[in-house]
């Protein structure tokens, strides 16, 4: 059951511009959302998270937006850098449930 | 602080064989989770262990099993391997395994079943 979906397998952006990665979920009980970044031959690394009681969380160049009514979250990277080129996974969890649901990932390519 | 260590990095097996993967979490982390990553499917949750007890399990057949030792190290076993089991298996650890804790992932074990 794919409860978290990333419908764009890939995204290409020019260096210095904004990258917007999208994620949709179906389970309204999710209350915590995270973004991970993955380089080839490495495990995913945590990037940024947001609780369902918020609609925005910012950390440097990275901002995550949550729209609970639309069951949609997005990750904005401004400005995008070539080092941001990686696969980005969104993930969701429910309080007291020790498992995360991951999307299928979006491969971001930032062109110099 | 050392990160999450997974061994081996690569494995090649044939159908019908069994395989055991190992994961050493970050020191002090008591929760270990396992995920399977295949192209186009993202990360699929296999199971989560905390204090040697399996607390949660994903939708995988019984051929997939795991365990956790008293030092929090974990092993995952796949019996009667099938071609479709070829994937990257990722182990992740966290302090308590709470829903609002970030996971720390190892580099994974790439399993190829021929």
Image (cartoon, coloured by chain):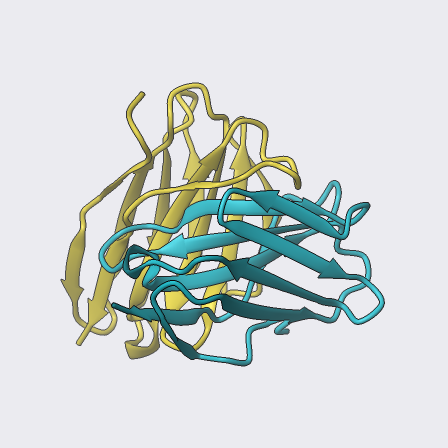
Chain colours: A cyan, B yellow
Q: Position of residue B62 (x, y in %)?
A: 49, 61
Residue A64 or residue B98, whichever sits in front: A64
How far across and how far down the image is residue B98, in percent?
64, 35
Q: Is residue B63 visible?
A: no
Left or right of residue B86: residue A7? right
Does A99 sit above or below residue B51?
below
Quarter of the image where the C terminus of chain A is located: bottom left
Q: Position of residue B97 (x, y in %)?
A: 58, 35
Residue B55 shown left or right of residue A19 in the figure: right
Q: Quadrant of the N terminus of chain A?
A: bottom right
Whole-percent x, y for residue B61 in the image:
50, 66
User: Could you say which is closer to the camera, residue A58 or residue A97?
Assistant: A58
Is residue B36 visible to us here? yes
Q: Residue at x 81, y 62 (%)?
A: A68
Give the left or right position of residue A99, taking residue A44 as reference: right
How many numbered markers are drawn? 0
- Taking A5 as reference, is B59 above or below it? above
* Residue beneath the point at 75% across and 55% down: A30
- Residue B13, compared with residue A62, is above or below; it is below
Q: Nearer the viewer, residue A50 or A43?
A: A50
- Residue at 36% from the left image edge and 75% from the top image edge: B39
């Amino acid at each position: 059951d794919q409860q978290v979906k990333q419908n764009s397998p890939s995204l290409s952006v020019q260096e210095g511009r904004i990258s917007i990665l999208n994620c949709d979920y179906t389970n309204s009980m999710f209350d915590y959302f995270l973004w991970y970044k993955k380089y080839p031959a490495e495990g995913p690394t945590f990037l940024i998270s947001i609780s369902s009681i918020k609609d925005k969380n910012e950390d440097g160049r990275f901002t995550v937006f949550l729209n609970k009514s639309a069951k949609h979250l997005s990750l904005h990277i401004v400005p995008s850098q070539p080092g941001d080129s990686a696969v980005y996974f969104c993930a969701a969890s429910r309080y007291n449930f020790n498992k995360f649901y991951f999307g299928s990932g979006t491969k971001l390519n930032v062109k110099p | 602080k050392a990160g999450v260590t997974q061994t081996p990095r690569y494995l090649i097996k044939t159908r019908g064989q069994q395989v055991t993967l190992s994961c050493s979490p970050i020191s002090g982390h008591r929760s270990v989770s396992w995920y399977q990553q295949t192209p186009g499917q993202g990360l699929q949750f296999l199971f989560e262990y905390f204090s040697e007890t399996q607390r949660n399990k994903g939708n995988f057949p019984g051929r997939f099993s795991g365990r956790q030792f008293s030092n929090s190290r974990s092993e995952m076993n796949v019996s009667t391997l099938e071609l479709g089991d070829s994937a990257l298996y990722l182990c992740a650890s966290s302090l308590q395994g709470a829903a609002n804790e970030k996971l720390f992932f190892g580099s994974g074990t790439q399993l190829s079943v021929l």
